[in-house]
């Protein structure tokens, strides 16, 4: 038996609904239809009245989830695409994120954002928004890269007493498979060493973990041992694991699929440089998407985002400097 | 409403004396409408007030000290110095703490009502209060439509006080009456003279009763005039004398007092006694709040925004 990243997300939601009567799912087309990506397939039938279709009103959807969380429920809110969550931006960053700090009443909601690029999806169905949300105090931002993490981190997201932005990558939905669902997991806030190495640390997250792993494999043929750190959670950010890895390798490349201005990769470089400058044997480097909207045509799209080939090219630069 | 009017006057004078940091926003002219919300709500109901709803908050059992403590930044207030003035609340008591973005609280009220229904709790009503300016926002539209789709026991009370800060209604909307929007959303609508306490009590009370009886969302539109600036920093010179002299410009507190006298429910001396009592209550609250500590910026709990902070810290210590 094998299970995909998308099936793991569905399975985690089924388990959350079964185990906790406070959990419900709200979003566009999530009910009888089972969601645009089928992440809630069959759940409305299995859990009557707890998987509810929303009107096309992202602001009000987020507001409703916040109110329900305030009243003690554990809503899972599905945005059809991460890109559309900008319409709920105010509710997320000003209402949900400030609530606990202002009133001492927690706001435990999980916001599922199908994010990231797939060929042909274009500017409005491809965005990575983890940077934007991580900027705001009061939010937890998770970016699972594996089937196992998609499952266990979604369950942990539902259990966390804060608003959690759960960035699930659409490119991984069908491609990524595991033999079985995990029975144990790292805590969501701990980074994972996805591959060990001694020559260079690549820090990355979400779908870019797989590009980095492929690049590391390519570089092995050239005699380099590259370590890959999967952040898993971009907020909180596990700086300790990153620093420990850089202490071993002396070299750092940060890879992200988001736009290049600021962001997670910049944050990681800033932390390593300011707290661990002496650990570095060469200037650290960042590799991000290009500073344009995400293009439609597959030729342009595959040049817009980092890929195994461009990650390997960037890695060689750091290795040779 | 008398307590709210006098309390507001106290805040205005504290503001002028430089005793309050940040803005002061009064409900002057809107007390009749506001109090009509509060008196019809019960324990377990939900109220998302707007900046001019001191009367409604007090009638819905907000402790008198909450307003004084929040305006004066006492750590013992519900916001503990983290948020100020009108952005106060006690969500667990159904008093929501507004954010400044207009229209944004309505869907939060929807969420609480939705949760109650899901949990099998009957009889809850949620009221969201806004001015006519908020009706132009996307949030307002989305939330009223959402409540109608879900048939939630929501009452939205719109105080058309003729100005959103300085913007007159002709620059805010082009329909003849905001009440027409109720039809568009598929919700019940009612208009009321917001200067008339008796009418407000009746119309708002009926809307709340209808929602409680399961008849779906209700929109109440009140016409009145804001008898002050947007905040105490604003002299509101843009409000014309003609508008002030119009029926909408009547002072609802005076109208109510005259009505009470006419009906012989109370005499002038009783009203004077109520005023004196209210003034005493206010004075005591302000004195208490002024004596209390201001927040300590070196206290670490101010600088963590996550309820789950302990979750991450415990793991760090354990690792």
Image: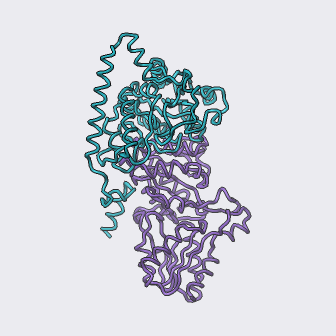
Chain colours: A purple, B cyan
Above-or-below relation of B53 to A148:
above
Task: Identify which residue is drawn at 49% across, 44% down.
Answer: B100
x, y (%) of residue A303? Answer: 69, 71
Q: Is residue A106 left or right of residue B154?
A: left
Above-or-below relation of B289 to A117:
above
Task: Identify which residue is drawn at 57% across, 67% down.
Answer: A207
Above-or-below relation of A3 to A69:
below
Does residue A109 appear anywhere in the picture?
yes
Residue B24 is drawn in which quadrant? Answer: top left
User: Camera-side residue: B45 or B79?
Assistant: B79
User: Camera-side residue: A61 or B24?
Assistant: B24
User: Camera-side residue: B47 or A20?
Assistant: B47
x, y (%) of residue B318? Answer: 30, 68
Does residue B213 appear anywhere in the picture?
no
Number of on-image labels:
0
Task: Identify which residue is drawn at 53% across, 34% down.
Answer: B131
Q: Is residue A66 left or right of residue A32?
A: left
x, y (%) of residue B124? Answer: 42, 30
Task: Identify which residue is drawn at 53% across, 21% down.
Answer: B192
x, y (%) of residue B238? Answer: 58, 36
Residue B87 is drawn in which quadrant? Answer: top left
Give the position of the C terminus of chain A as an image quadrant.
Answer: bottom right
């Amino acid at each position: 038996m094998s299970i995909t990243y998308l099936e793991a997300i569905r399975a985690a939601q089924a388990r959350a609904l079964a185990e906790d009567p406070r959990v419900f799912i709200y979003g566009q087309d999530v009910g009888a239809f089972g969601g645009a990506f089928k992440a809630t397939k069959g759940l409305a039938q299995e859990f009557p009245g707890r998987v509810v279709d929303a009107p096309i009103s992202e602001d009000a959807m987020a507001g409703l989830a916040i109110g329900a969380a305030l009243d003690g429920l554990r809503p899972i809110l599905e945005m059809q695409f991460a890109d559309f969550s900008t319409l709920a931006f105010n509710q997320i960053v000003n209402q949900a994120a400030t609530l606990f700090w202002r009133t001492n009443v927690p706001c435990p909601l999980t916001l599922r954002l199908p994010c990231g690029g797939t060929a042909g999806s274009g500017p409005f169905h491809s965005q990575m928004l983890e940077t934007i949300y991580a900027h705001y105090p009061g939010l937890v931002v998770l970016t699972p890269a594996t089937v196992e993490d998609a499952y266990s981190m979604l369950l942990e997201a539902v259990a966390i007493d804060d608003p959690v932005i759960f960035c699930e990558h659409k490119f991984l939905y069908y491609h990524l498979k595991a033999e079985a669902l995990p029975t144990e997991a790292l805590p969501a806030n701990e980074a994972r060493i996805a591959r060990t190495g001694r020559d260079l640390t690549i820090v990355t997250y979400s779908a870019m973990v797989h590009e980095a792993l492929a690049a590391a494999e390519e570089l092995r043929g050239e005699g380099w041992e590259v370590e890959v750190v999967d952040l898993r959670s971009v907020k909180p950010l596990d700086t300790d694991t990153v620093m420990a890895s850089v202490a071993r390798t002396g070299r750092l490349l940060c890879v992200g699929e988001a736009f290049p201005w600021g962001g997670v990769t910049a944050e990681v470089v800033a932390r390593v440089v300011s707290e661990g400058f002496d650990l570095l044997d060469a200037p650290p480097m960042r590799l991000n998407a290009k500073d344009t909207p995400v293009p439609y045509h597959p030729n342009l799209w595959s040049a817009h985002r980092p890929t195994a080939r461009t990650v390997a090219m960037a890695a060689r630069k750091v290795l040779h400097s | 409403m008398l307590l709210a009017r006098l309390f507001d006057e106290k805040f205005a004078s504290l503001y002028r004396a430089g005793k309050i940091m940040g803005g002061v926003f009064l409900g002057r002219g809107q007390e009749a409408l506001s109090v009509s919300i509060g008196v019809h709500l019960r324990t377990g109901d939900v109220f998302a007030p707007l900046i001019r709803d001191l009367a409604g908050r007090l009638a819905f059992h907000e402790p008198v000290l909450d307003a004084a403590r929040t305006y004066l930044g006492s750590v013992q207030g519900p916001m503990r110095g983290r948020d100020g003035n009108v952005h106060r609340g006690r969500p667990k008591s159904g008093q929501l703490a507004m954010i400044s973005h207009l229209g944004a609280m309505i869907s939060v009220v929807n969420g609480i009502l939705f949760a109650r229904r899901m949990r099998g709790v009957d009889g809850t009503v949620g009221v969201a209060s806004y001015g006519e300016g908020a009706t132009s926002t996307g949030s307002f539209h989305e939330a009223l439509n959402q409540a109608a789709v879900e048939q939630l026991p929501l009452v939205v009370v719109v105080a058309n006080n003729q100005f959103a800060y300085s913007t007159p209604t002709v620059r805010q909307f082009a329909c003849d009456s905001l009440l027409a929007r109720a039809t568009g959303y598929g919700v019940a609508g009612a208009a009321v003279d917001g200067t008339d306490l008796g009418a407000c009590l009746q119309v708002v009370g009926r809307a709340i009763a209808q929602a409680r009886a399961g008849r779906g969302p209700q929109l109440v539109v009140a016409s009145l005039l804001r008898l002050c600036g947007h905040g105490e920093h604003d002299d509101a010179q843009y409000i014309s004398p003609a508008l002030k002299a119009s029926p909408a410009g009547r002072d609802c507190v005076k109208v109510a007092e005259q009505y009470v006298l006419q009906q012989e429910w109370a005499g002038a001396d009783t009203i004077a006694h109520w005023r004196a009592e209210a003034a005493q209550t206010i004075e005591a609250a302000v004195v208490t709040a002024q004596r209390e500590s201001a927040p300590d910026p070196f206290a670490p709990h101010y600088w963590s925004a996550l309820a789950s902070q302990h979750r991450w810290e415990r793991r760090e210590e354990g690792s």
